[in-house]
Amino acid sequence: MKTIRLTVGQAVVVFLKNQYVERDGIESPFFAGCLGIFGHGIIAGVGQGLSQNTDFRYFMTRNEQSSVHIAMAYAKMKNRLGTFACISSIGPGATNMITGAACATINRLPVLIIPGDIFARRNVAPVLQQLESASTQDISVNDCFKPVSKYWDRINRAEQLVTSLPEVMRVLTSPADTGTVTLCLPQDVQAEAFDFPEELFRKRVWKITRPRPDSSLLKEAVSLIKASKKPVIISGGGVIYSEATEILKQLVERTGIPVTETFAGKGALLYNHPLNLGAVGATGTPGANEITEQADLVIGIGTRYSDFITASKTAFQNPDVKFININIADFDSLKHSALPLTGDTKVILEELSESLTDYKVADEYRSHVASLSKTWDDQVSKFYKVSGELPVSQIEVVGAVNDFAGPRDVVLCAAGSLPGDLHKLWRTRDPKGFHLEYGYSTMGYECAAGIGAKMACPDREIYVMVGDGNYLMMNNEIVTAIQEGIKFNIILLNNNGFASIGGLSQSIGSQRFGTKYRYRDEETGLLTGDILPVDFAQNARSLGAHVIETHDIDSLKSALVEAKSQTRTTVITIETSLTKGTPGYAWWEVAIAEVSEIDSVKKARAEYLENKKKQRYYL
C-alpha cells in the first residue's frame, strides 16, 4: 500500500479538496473552501495545511457563527450539493459556532465544523481556554456540539482520521441524514505526521441517489388520493432540494390538487399559478388555511411540519383527514401517522403522476381554489399600495422590493416580523427566489448568509431584508463581503425596536414590555424614554458598504436602482413603523400566564384556552 506522509491538519485539507458529488450525471466539488478565524488551536495544524494548499481557498470571516451561516446559505442555494468547512480555535471560537451548528442541523443543511481542541496528550493541561472537569479528563467545550450534530468525532490519534473522514462525507452528502458534522481536532494531534494511505486522497465522487418508494405503499397512496374529494399538497423544502418543481407543476395541473407552501417550500410553484394558494399555517393566506382546514387528505412533500405550518396542530380540522408524507427521511415521512412514501421527492412524484392519469378533483373544487388564489393576489396588490404615511409600513417596503426585483433575484431573511410578511406577501417567480431560514429563525443569519447565497449564484441579485434589532446582532460580515469583492444588497428596516416579539408581547397581554430601543426612564425605571440615537447608515459606512439613506417609498425605489448598479455590498436604510403589521395571521401557540394581575394578560389567557380547543393529535 502506497502511503504519503502528512500532518493531520494537512491530511484534512487534502482530503476535503478531493471530494465531489454527482446527481443526475452532473458532477461538482462538494467544498467551496474553508471559512473561519485562526487562533492558537487551529493555526499551526489545519491553518498550516491551508497555507500550502492555496487551491483550497480560505476565507477570513469576522465571527465564527457567521462562518456557519455563510456555509448554510451556500448549501441551501446549491440544493445541498455543496458547502464549506468552518474552522475555529479551541474555546470561545468553537462555542461561537454552536448556534450555527444547531441552525444547520435543524434546517437539514450540510455544514462541516472543524473546531480546534485541547491537547490529546493532556500533559500541559489545563491549557488556555480549557474547560476543566473534576469527574473526567475526556471532555472539552466541543462536547457541546454533540446534541446539535448529525455526526461528531474527535481525532485523538492520527490514524483515526482514515476511518473518520469517509464517515464525515457519508453524513454530509446524505439527503436523509445531513446536517452539521463536527470533527474535533486536538491541537497537538493536528501537527503530528503520519503515513496515510495514498488512496485516501484520491478524487472521490459521492453519488447522490434518488431512492424509490416501497411499491405497495405507493399503490396504497394512489388509492387514498383517488378516494379523496378535497386533497391538498403542503410543499416543503424537499421539493426544491430534489429539483422536483417541474414534475410537481405537471402533477397538480393534471389532477387539480392545490398547493400550499412552507417557508422552505415557497417557490416550488410560481406565485401566480391558479392552483398555488401560497403560504400555509400561522403565517398562511386565508385561502390556504381554509383549504387545509377542510382537507380530507393532506399530502406533505418534503416538509417537517413545524408548528408554524400546522398552526400549532389546529390547521387540519376535517375529522376524517388522512396524511400521505413524501420525504427522503423516515423520521419526517412518518409524522402525523401518515402513509409514508420514503424516498426521493422527484422520483416519487413521477411515479405518482404516472398512476394518477385518470384522477382529477371536482371542477367546483378546482374553481374555488383558483378563486381563492386570485382573491389573495388582489389583496397583496392592495397591501403593496403606497399610503403616503410616514414612517412607512414594512408591507410597503416588501412590496417595493418585490416589484423591483427580477424574476431570478433572491430575497433572503431569517428572523423578526419580516419572515411572516414575506411568507404571506412575496411573489416568488423562481424556485430559488425565496431564501428563508425559519427552522431556527436565527437573528444574525442574514448579513452573513447574503455572502453565501451570492457565492452560490453570482449571476443573481441578492436582497437581504433585515430589521434593526437583527442587524445590530451580527452585521460584521459586511467587512468580509467588502474584502472578498462580494456584492449583495441589504435593506435595513429601522423601527426602533423588536417588531415581531413586540407584537407577540402585545398579543399575549404584556404590552410590548422590553421590546423598544429606548433610554431608561429615570422616573419609572423602565425602557420607556426617548428613542436611542443609533446611526445605522454611519455604522454601515464604517464597515465599507455603499450606503443609501431613504425616508419614503419613492426614495426607496430610486435607491434600489442605484444599488443594482453598484459593485460592492450596498446597505439601504429606511425607517418603518413599529406597529403597522400585516393583518390576518392564524393562531400560533405561545403559552400565556395562567394567573396575572394584568387585565390584558387575563383576556389573552381566555382567548388562548379557546384556541387550544382546536388542537388535535393525528394518530
Image (cartoon, rainbow, N blue to C red):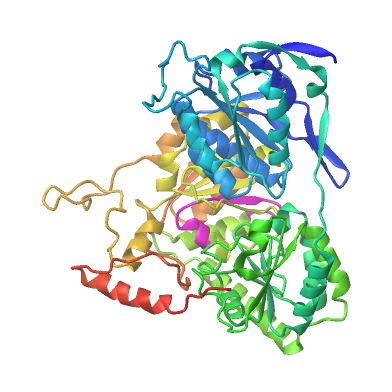
Total marks in image: 0
Query: Is residue 492 toward the left or the right of residue 265 in the image?
Result: left
Residue found at the very far left of the displayed protein = 523
Magenta span contains residue 407: yes
Depth check: give the residue in front, 429 or 572.
429
Q: 377 and 431: which one is in front?
A: 431
- Front-most of 85 and 285? 85
Q: Does residue 407 appear in the picture of this structure?
A: no
User: In this rendering, is residue 426 above or below 166?
Assistant: below
Q: Which residue is more in the foreground, 457 or 104?
A: 104
Viewport quadrant of the N terminus: top right
Q: Residue at x 71, y 28 (%)?
A: 163
**Which residues lie in the magenta part?**
405-421
Percent across and percent down for residue 168 are: 68, 34
* x, y percent for residue 563: 58, 43
Eyeballing the image, is 317 above or below 445? below
Quarter of the rendering containing residue 217: bottom right
Q: Is residue 352 left or right of residue 143?
A: right
Q: Position of residue 152 (x, y in %)?
A: 59, 35
> Can residue 511 be seen in this snapshot?
yes
Residue 236 in the figure: left or right of residue 312:
right
- Please say if 446 is above or below 340: above
In this rendering, the answer to whether 123 lies above or below 419 is above
- Does the magenta segment cover residue 59? no
Q: Where residue 42 appears, x then y in whole percent? A: 55, 19
Q: Is residue 18 left or right of residue 386?
A: right
- Residue extending furthest front? 135
Q: Which quarter of the rendered picture does the C terminus lie within? A: bottom right
Identified at 72% across, 45% down, the residue is 174
| Residue located at (17% from left, 49% from top) | 521
